[in-house]
Image (cartoon, rainbow, N blue to C red):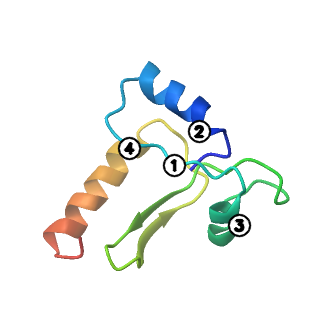
Amino acid sequence: MSVDPVARLEKFRDKYDLKFRLAGDQDRTVGTAYGTLKGDASGPHERDTFLIAPDRTILLAYRRVGAKGHAATVLDDARGLHEEGHI
């Protein structure tokens, strides 16, 4: 999620040749619901990651993470959850 306009997200996606959609949250509804906004409700999102099951249950939450190595950690955890039948 990003509070950036969709056009900016699409530019970022295209620049890095990402093969998935990026979700926008310009009105900050999702950030408010998940508690991921920095400071007050007008700020950007923290770098948080959630693994969410098909039934919308939050399986894992990572708060205020750094970018380096985080994707590999989440992928390993997702694989473990898959092997256990959670996703």
Closest to the observer: 13 or 85? 13
Closest to the observer: 72 or 33? 33
- Residue at point 55% right, 49% down? 65
Q: Residues within 10 Å of mark 4 (few under 14, many from 20)?
A: few
Task: Give amino acid for label 4.
Answer: Ala
Task: Give amino acid for label 1.
Answer: Ala
Task: Give amino acid for label 2.
Answer: Val
- Residue at point 43% right, 23% down? 14
Q: Earlier in the sequence, mark 2 or mark 1?
A: 2
User: Which residue in the protein does label 1 denote?
Assistant: 23
The CA span between labels 3 and 4 is 24 Å
- Residue at point 72% right, 56% down? 27
The CA span between labels 2 and 1 is 8 Å
The CA span between labels 4 and 1 is 17 Å
Residue 46 picture location, percent across and down: 66, 51
Residue 29 picture location, percent across and down: 68, 64
User: Which residue in the protein does label 2 denote?
Assistant: 6
Q: Is 29 located above or below residue 76 in the figure?
A: below
User: Which residue in the protein does label 3 denote?
Assistant: 32
User: Which residue in the protein does label 4 denote?
Assistant: 71
**What is the quadrant of residue 34 in the picture?**
bottom right
